[in-house]
Amino acid sequence: MNRRRFLETASVATAVSATAGVLTSCKDDAACTLKPGEILHTVAFSLKHGKESDATNAFLSDGKKILTSIPVVRNFQVFRQTSPKCTFDFGFSMVFTNRTDFETYNNHPDHVSFVKERWETEVSGFQETDYESL
């Protein structure tokens, strides 16, 4: 396995373990577990801006504001990467009640606009993962 592929794989594994904590702020185990049909949508990413820049802070803040305004988005969180094993710097995660809500989010004008105007111009690399409970 070459180094780049290893780092990409490690990045995905780190993103998975980071998102495992998404639901851990719940008050009880039942509330922390994805219910059948629910989808945990995650994306680990790096920005073209410096990690501590005003532009980065604006992107993270605007992302949260814009994406949480979409009614089907639940449990939205923003993360800063802390593992030296991962090549990405930040993460977003959110939960959808079902596949229909996930598709509604993907096609929502605010999401489409955010992707076109901000994501495509400011993100230097990313890994998206979507999970359903087994």
Image: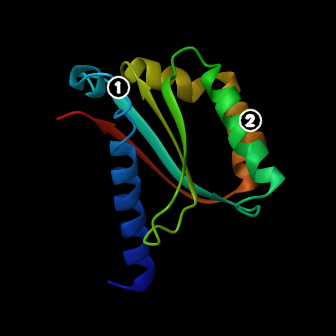
- Determine whether 80 is above or below 133 in the image: below
Mark 1 residue crowding within 10 angstroms, few (<14) / some (14–19) / many (20+): few
Residue at 52% x, 20% y: name it.
104
Q: In which quarter of the image is residue 105?
A: top right
Q: Tell me the tag on residue 62.
A: 2
Residue at screen point 75% across, 52% down: 56
Report the side of 121 relative to 29 (left or right): right
Mark 1, secondary structure of its residue: loop
The residue that appears at 43% across and 69% down in the rendered structure is 8
Q: Name which quarter of the figure residue 45 lies in.
A: bottom right
**View extreme (right): residue:** 54
Locate residue 63 relative to residue 95 in the image: left or right: right
- Quarter of the image with the N terminus is bottom left
Residue at figure coordinates x 40%, y 50% from the top left: 18
Amino acid beneath label 2: Asp
Seen as rendered, the residue at the extreme top is: 71
Residue located beneath label 1 in the image: 26
The residues tagged by marks 1 and 2 sit, at their Cα atoms, a distance apart of 25 Å
Q: Where is residue 83 in the image (x, y as percent from the top left)?
A: 45, 65
